[in-house]
């Protein structure tokens, strides 16, 4: 029942995608016209609206790919330029020309922003190509049905075979077509490797600036704490001991009192240094690693805290420290603001990434935009390309989710005979399934005289069907093996994905 | 009384040896690394060991690990662990086998020679010596514990000293109370916390620590 429903959903989706591909084609042709008008006639004014139309259509495609195929595609466009700013004399400068009003400089900025962005031209290519590739694939069952119906209406009952074939394959075919649409869209509508790198560089650049700033501030704080605290106390201790030394002969009683004072001062100094060290790099983290350090945090927390840890090895010290302080802050928040009584901390490795989830049963309502603590965690994690996501509906529960990519080494699975075999299967399954199996079957069903290179049509009549069915089974089997080896390899590499 | 000492800082090691000798202990081994410590503990079977948590070669919790390993081989081997910082986690691990004869103190406590030596003797006798800092953190993390909230301030003071491992007599001396007054307080604490009373000092301390650790 559910499979029938999902097949129907997939059919509806693939039909919608086919329709959308046609709409995209219309947008693509509009853009083609705009490009011709712009560059051949010089009617530049039509270009930006056409690009905006194209972007609207591709944006919809991206959303559908994410929702229906589970393939999330980031927007590849460069950030829109800010509006032009007038000079101090009120004029707008654009190159060597001055303008009284901002309209033309703004248009120029927009023009450069659109024409210089490769994403514009990739959108254009997608809109023209999609109807022929994923659109056609998505529409294939409909086309086959329509073709069959036309043949039936024309009096040829064999047309029913087409309809029947379309109905039979749709449960498998339609979901695949929807997924294929997502992949084609990802290939053309996603950011290129270059754009992705550029985005990452600018993000890391910002994160580094923040990290360096906060590190400098932290060092200043430590310097101040040492200067005003332990250092001053050591000076006082030295002076007290000196005074005691002088009194040793004349007034042993007073000397003894002074020495006692010096001892007390040294204990206080130690306490201050201990507190400072805890804030810089907690000793338990250095001694035991993240897992036990989080357990120690849980013990110190007034909440009933349950900790589960599953890590393959120790991550690098700075990364462990970032994760530790994040958990520390989150637990403190839960105890302070959330009225929580119980908390759950889960620390685990997901491939090369370190994931931490902190959940509490408090009243929720935490907002990363508001809390400076949460902002601090984000800044700390940002230096490692890490992210913090907080789900905190009013009324609770609050769940904070931290991911630090590249915390652990990626294990590449060794090239085993099994993997070579898997690759061979990837290469062979389409040949067995499509030409030798399905295509030969269709030819046999319609009674075509064409034999071509289809093995099933060359063997003597009684063996033809067994060979064709055997080919289909073989193709399916090879595909299954290929998928299985890939899944196993991915598992061996620890589900690594980026 | 025979003592094994493990401390990697030369100055502090010499100081501790002098302090212990001055109080009539016999220091049978003063080592400076984890493997040496384990060998000395198992080989010498001292009456008590004084161990620094962080030791070479790893400079992590080598000393603690060696002490725990030795206690697995020689059950009940009295060990007093010293550290620059205290963690509830480590205290729990030391107390886990429930057999007593453990101490866990901040290094600062050696400043007060008398009290420190008193703690070493207590551990050697199978008792407990927990740092006031450990107890403070234990109580802080138990802040929302219902039964603890029902204690009077005076009972809380008695509880803190008891959890540190002090006997009734020592608690009375500290708080300027008579033995019978301390006894009344402890009885009341045990009733409020729902613990079975016991006349044995050591067993009572372990019961209190187990209660505080059961959060």
Image: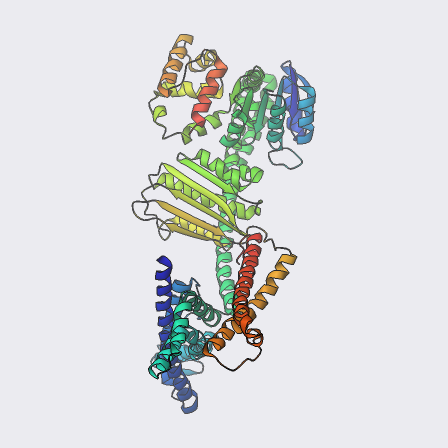
* Residue A293 percent coordinates (x, y): 51, 38
* Residue A289 percent coordinates (x, y): 55, 41
Q: Is residue A227 visible?
A: no
Please name whichever residue, A447 or A323, is drawn nearer the observer in this view of the structure: A447
> Residue at left 56%, top 31%?
B84
Please name whichever residue, A274 or A308, is drawn nearer the observer in this view of the structure: A308
Horizontal arrangement in the rendering, residue A457 relative to residue A125 (left or right): right
Does B26 appear above or below A386? above
| Residue A36 sits in quarter | bottom left
Residue farthest toward the left in the current orientation of the protein: A395
Please name whichever residue, A30 or B125, is drawn nearer the observer in this view of the structure: A30
| Residue A340 sits in quarter | top left
Q: How is the image coloured?
A: rainbow
Residue farthest toward the front in the current orientation of the protein: A462
Does A425 appear above or below A290? below
Horizontal arrangement in the rendering, residue A223 relative to residue A63 (left or right): right
State the quadrant of the N terminus of chain A: bottom left
| Residue A344 sits in quarter | top left
Q: Is residue B167 visible?
A: yes
* Residue A227 percent coordinates (x, y): 52, 40
Does B160 appear above or below A381? above
> Residue at left 42%, top 9%?
B179
Horizontal arrangement in the rendering, residue B70 relative to residue A204 (left or right): right
* Residue A38 percent coordinates (x, y): 41, 87
Labels in figure, total: 0
Residue farthest toward the bottom in the current orientation of the protein: A41
Please name whichever residue, A134 or A346, is drawn nearer the observer in this view of the structure: A134
Does A344 appear above or below B77? below
């Amino acid at each position: 029942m559910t499979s029938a429903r999902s097949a129907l959903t997939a059919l509806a989706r693939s039909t919608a995608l086919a329709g959308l591909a046609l709409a995209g084609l219309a947008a693509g042709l509009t853009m083609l016209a705009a490009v011709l008008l712009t560059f051949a006639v010089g009617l530049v004014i039509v270009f930006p609206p056409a690009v905006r139309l194209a972007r609207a259509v591709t944006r919809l495609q991206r959303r559908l790919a994410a929702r229906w195929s589970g393939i999330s595609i980031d927007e590849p466009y460069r950030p829109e330029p800010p509006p032009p700013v007038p000079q101090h004399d009120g004029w707008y400068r654009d190159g060597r020309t001055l303008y009284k009003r901002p309209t033309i400089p703004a248009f120029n900025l927009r023009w450069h922003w659109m024409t210089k962005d490769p994403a514009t031209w990739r959108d254009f290519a997608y809109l023209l190509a999609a109807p022929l590739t994923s659109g056609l694939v998505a529409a294939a069952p409909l086309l086959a049905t329509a073709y069959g119906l036309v043949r039936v209406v024309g009096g040829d009952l064999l047309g029913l075979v087409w309809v029947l074939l379309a109905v039979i394959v749709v449960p498998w075919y339609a979901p695949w077509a929807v997924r294929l649409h997502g992949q084609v869209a990802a290939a053309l509508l996603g950011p290129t490797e270059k754009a992705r790198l550029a985005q990452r560089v600018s993000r890391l650049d910002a994160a580094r600036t923040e990290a360096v700033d906060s590190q400098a501030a932290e060092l200043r704080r430590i310097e101040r704490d040492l200067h005003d605290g332990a250092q001053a106390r050591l000076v006082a201790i030295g002076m007290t001991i000196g005074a005691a030394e002088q009194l040793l002969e004349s007034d042993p009683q007073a000397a003894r009192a002074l020495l006692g004072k010096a001892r007390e001062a040294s204990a206080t100094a130690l306490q201050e240094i201990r507190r400072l060290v805890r804030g810089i790099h907690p000793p338990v983290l250095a001694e035991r690693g993240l897992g036990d350090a989080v357990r120690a945090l849980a013990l110190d927390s007034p909440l009933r805290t349950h900790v589960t840890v599953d890590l393959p090895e120790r991550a690098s010290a700075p990364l462990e420290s970032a994760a530790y302080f994040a958990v520390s802050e989150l637990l403190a928040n839960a105890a302070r603001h959330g009225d929580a009584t119980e908390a759950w901390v889960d620390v685990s490795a997901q491939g090369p990434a370190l994931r931490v989830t902190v959940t509490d049963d408090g009243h929720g309502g935490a907002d990363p935009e508001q809390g400076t603590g949460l902002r601090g965690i984000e800044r700390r994690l940002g230096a490692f390309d890490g992210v913090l996501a907080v789900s905190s509906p009013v009324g609770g529960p609050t769940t904070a989710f931290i991911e630090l990519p590249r915390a652990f080494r990626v294990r590449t699975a060794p090239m085993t005979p099994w993997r070579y075999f898997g690759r061979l299967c990837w290469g062979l399954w389409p040949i067995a399934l499509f030409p030798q199996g399905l295509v030969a079957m269709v030819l046999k069903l319609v009674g075509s005289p064409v034999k071509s290179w289809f093995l099933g049509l060359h063997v003597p009549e009684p063996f033809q069907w067994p060979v064709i069915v055997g080919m289909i089974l073989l193709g399916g089997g090879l595909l299954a093996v290929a998928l299985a080896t890939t899944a196993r390899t991915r598992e061996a590499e620890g589900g690594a994905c980026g | 009384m025979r003592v094994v000492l493990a401390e990697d800082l030369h100055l502090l090691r010499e100081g501790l040896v002098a302090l212990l000798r001055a109080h009539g202990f016999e220091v049978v081994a003063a080592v400076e690394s984890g493997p040496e410590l384990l060998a000395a503990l198992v080989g010498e079977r001292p009456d008590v060991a004084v161990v620094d948590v962080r030791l070479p070669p790893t400079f992590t919790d080598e000393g603690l690990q060696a002490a725990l390993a030795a206690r697995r081989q020689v059950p009940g081997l009295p060990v007093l662990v010293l550290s620059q910082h205290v963690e509830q986690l480590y205290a729990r691990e030391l107390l886990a086998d429930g057999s007593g004869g453990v101490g866990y103190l901040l290094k600062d406590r050696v400043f007060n020679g008398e009290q420190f030596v008193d703690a070493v003797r207590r551990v050697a006798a199978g008792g407990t010596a927990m740092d006031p800092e450990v107890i403070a953190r234990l109580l802080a993390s138990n802040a929302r514990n219902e039964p603890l909230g029902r204690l009077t301030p005076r009972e809380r003071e008695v509880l803190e000293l008891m959890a540190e491992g002090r006997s009734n007599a020592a608690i009375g001396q500290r708080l300027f109370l008579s033995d019978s007054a301390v006894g009344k307080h402890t009885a009341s604490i045990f009733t409020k916390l729902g613990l079975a009373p016991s006349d044995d000092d050591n067993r009572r301390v372990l019961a209190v620590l187990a209660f505080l650790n059961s959060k």
